[in-house]
Image: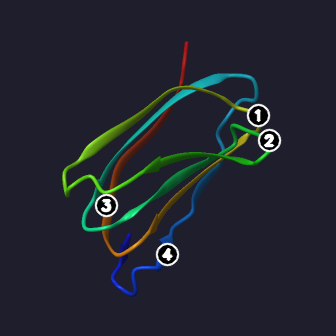
Amino acid sequence: IDYVGPASGFARWYQSPGAVLTPGEKYAASFWIRADDNASGVVEFYGFTTSPSWLQIGWQDSDDAWVQIIVPELTAVSTNLGLYPSMSGQGYVYFDDFFIGELP
């Protein structure tokens, strides 16, 4: 995600593979992120909470270095999975290797 407008800018992208979760089952999630300048934001995971309907994982400027974010356990409350990487501020944010897998 790239936003180079005023410092108060906002950009996001939503991806949903559909009905891939089993309610009540536990999952682990991870992704890589790289942010520069004053970029910050969240990744919202849909399908794991009911109120609010998303779980937010936040970050701030990672000094242009790749950082792996790991969520060791999530419990599905829906069959539908949604990912919503979002950024605010000014600069560049890169996402890579989103992974969500069911735990044994």
Residue 18 drawn at (x, y percent)? 66, 50
- Residue displayed at 63% across by 22% down: 26
> Is residue 77 depicted above or below 59 in this figure?
above
Q: Nearer the viewer, residue 90 or 3?
A: 90
Secondary structure state at the residue bearing disc 4: strand
Residues tagged 1 and 4 counted as in contact (Cβ below 8 A): no
Secondary structure state at the residue bearing disc 2: loop
Secondary structure state at the residue bearing disc 1: loop
* Quadrant holding the N terminus: bottom left
Nearest to N terminus: mark 2 or mark 4 = 4
Judged by depth in the image, the label closer to the viewer, 2 or 4, is 4
Q: Disc 1 to disc 4, how far (Cα)? A: 29 Å
Residue at label 4?
Answer: 10
Residues tagged 1 and 2 counted as in contact (Cβ below 8 A): yes
Q: Nearer the viewer, residue 67 or 100?
A: 67
Q: Disc 1 to disc 2, how far (Cα)? A: 7 Å
Q: Which label number is shown at residue 18?
A: none
Secondary structure state at the residue bearing disc 3: strand
* Quadrant holding the C terminus: top right
* Residue 28 relative to residue 69: left or right: right
For mark 4, does the 10 Å Cα neighbourhood hold few (<14), some (14 to 19), or many (20 or more) residues? some
Residue at label 3?
Answer: 94
Residue 37 drawn at (x, y percent)? 25, 68
Q: Disc 2 to disc 4, how far (Cα)? A: 25 Å
Q: Which label number is shown at residue 77?
A: 1
- Residue displayed at 68% across by 22% down: 25
For mark 2, does the 10 Å Cα neighbourhood hold few (<14), some (14 to 19), or many (20 or more) residues? few
Q: Nearer the viewer, residue 60 or 78?
A: 60
Mark 3 residue type: Tyr
- Residue displayed at 19% across by 51% down: 65
Mark 1 residue type: Val
- Residue displayed at 67% across by 35% down: 21
